[in-house]
Amino acid sequence: MNPNLGINDKDRTGVVKILNTLLADEYVLYTKTRNYHWNVVGPQFNDLHKFFGEQYGQLDDFVDDVAERARQLGGHSVATLSEFVQEARLKEHPGQYPSAEEMLENLLADHETIIRQLRVDADTAASKFHDAGHQRLPHRPDGESREDGVDAPRLPRGQVRPLALEDGSSGPVETPSSSRAPASALRG
Ligand SMILES: [Fe+2]
């Protein structure tokens, strides 16, 4: 069943495609960070082992958010290792065990690659697919907190009214004729 979120099927499909490519990138970065957590060596082992552990923990949350956003939009989430590798823009380097310093450089470069791509994807989702829900995804280019504001699905002018949320904030909108969707589904 397609969700009734004020976004047409073509736009939904386009956004889900963007999300799944991001999901693949995030999963490759998660795996690379976990690899480094396991394989880092040197005098900074203890600090970096912990640091990489914290990082892959955060990436695990990001991956989950992105995958579930795709599901909220009625799409499937890419969810196999072979698909992650196939869809990802980030590259893996099997059999290579870089120095601790190179590990940090590699991870920084990958985070920067995702952020650069997100700038493009954010513009595409909003301007081409009429969906600004990406603003709550991780790795926001503008660095704003994920907790600020609540994004609303875009609906035609004149057909919207404020929807009161459980937490009292203003945010998502709905058409007067539509049944009220769970706020959690609209927040993304
Ligand atoms: Fe561990």
Image (cartoon, rainbow, N blue to C red):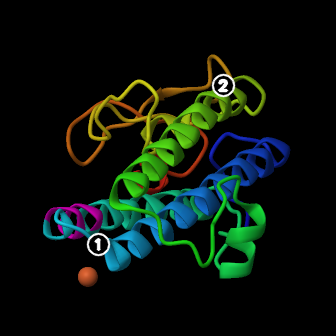
The secondary structure type at the circle numbered 2 is helix
Q: Which mark is residue 25?
A: none
Separation of marks 2 and 1 at Cα, in angstroms: 40 Å
Is residue 90 visible in this depiction of the protein?
yes
In-front residue for pair 117/153: 117
Q: Which residue is mark 1?
A: 41
Kind of residue at disc 1: Val
Q: Nearer the viewer, mark 2 or mark 1?
A: 1
Residue at 59% x, 59% y: name it: 23
User: Quick check: 96 left or right of 148?
Assistant: right
Label 1, secondary structure: give it.
loop
| Majority SS type along the magenta span | helix
Label 2 or label 1, whichever comes before in sequence order: 1
- Name the residue rendered at 43%, 53% in the picture: 102
Does the image show residue 188? no
Q: Quadrant of ligand 1?
A: bottom left
Q: Which residue is mark 2?
A: 123
Relative to residue 127, is residue 169 depicted above or below?
A: below
Residue 142 appears at what percent x and percent y? Answer: 41, 24
User: What's under tag 2, amino acid-wise?
Assistant: Asp
Extreme-top residue of the structure: 158
The quadrant in which residue 35 appears is bottom left
Badge 1 crowding class, 10 Å Cα cut-off, few under 14, some 14 to 19, many 20 or more, is some
Q: Nearer the viewer, residue 108 or 70?
A: 108
Q: Magenta residues?
A: 47-52
